[in-house]
Amino acid sequence: MLNIVLFGPPGAGKGTQSKKLVADFNLVHLSTGDMLRAERKSGSELGQRVSAIIDAGELVSDEIVIELIATRLDNNADAAGFIFDGFPRTIAQAEALDRLLSEKDTSISCMISLKVPEEELVTRLLQRGRKDDNEETIRNRVGVYQEETLPVAGYYQKQAKLNEIDGVGTVEEIAQRVATVLKAYA
Ligand code: AP5
Ligand code: MG
């Protein structure tokens, strides 16, 4: 299996590059942000609980996102591999993911970390205009990323699975850089 953690700050292009990888490598895309927004849209009790947290750019609890991922792993038992987008965002999530995958006799193949300067992130996200893409929430999301999520890169570095990529350029150029890294793992 090819199991990729696609990592990077808000607006780095995780969702954009995931779409290309799904098409090129036949992987299942698991974005906890997309799942949480779908819960909110459905009006579920979970969706109502997380709504204000997403709008503030804070992290939803580890328990909630780990449960969402565990369910998707069970529901896609025949997958050729997974792209984890926006997950894991804490060391506890990374450890839980390792456990869940080892129960299925598989593991993370590599992390791809997209490096993009903060001002470029803000410009991209203000243009996109999702509900949490206002200047205040973006700055908070970037701060939360730096304080709570960046250590996750170190977690994979210790396992010699970290690959950093320049995330500035056209979508195609970045897809090429990602593909070059993945050749070593596929
Ligand atoms: P999440 O949905 O994961 O958002 P995020 O990490 O803030 O990242 P984005 O989705 O905004 O950016 P992206 O990297 O996917 O970039 P994209 O491809 O869209 O999380 C949202 C919230 O949910 C969190 O704040 C938290 O509350 C909660 N949450 C989610 N997961 C969680 C977890 N595991 N634990 C706890 N809480 C969790 O690109 C951005 C824009 O740039 C687009 O408009 C795109 O078209 C454009 N773009 C892309 N590539 C390029 C390029 N190369 N050049 C120019 N523009 C580009
Ligand atoms: Mg995204």
Image (cartoon, rainbow, N blue to C red):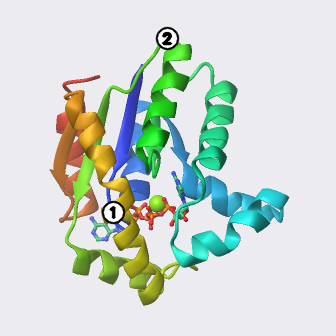
> As displayed, is residue 4 above or below residue 38?
above
Q: Is residue 157 left or right of residue 30?
A: left
Locate the C terminus by quadrant: top left
Residue drawn at x 33%, y 63% as measured from the top left: 147
Residue designated by label 2: 105
Marks 2 and 1, Cα distance to the nearest angstrom? 32 Å
Callout 2: CB less than 8 Å from ligand 1:
no
> Residue 154, located in which quarter of the rendered image?
top left
> As displayed, is residue 41 above or below residue 181?
below
Residue found at the far top of this picture: 105
Q: Earlier in the sequence, mark 2 or mark 1?
A: 2
Residue designated by label 1: 147
Nearest the viewer among 183 and 126 is: 126
Which secondary structure, mark 2?
loop
Q: Amino acid at mark 1?
A: Glu
The location of residue 183, given as percent across then percent down, is 21, 28
Callout 1: CB less than 8 Å from ligand 1:
no
Q: Are marks 2 and 1 in contact (CB under 8 Å)?
A: no
Q: Is residue 114 left or right of residue 24?
A: left
Q: Amino acid at mark 2?
A: Asp
Residue drawn at x 59%, y 59% as measured from the top left: 60
Which secondary structure, mark 1?
helix
The location of residue 61, given as percent across then percent down, is 60, 54
The location of residue 161, given as percent across then percent down, is 24, 31
Residue drawn at x 34%, y 78% as measured from the top left: 124
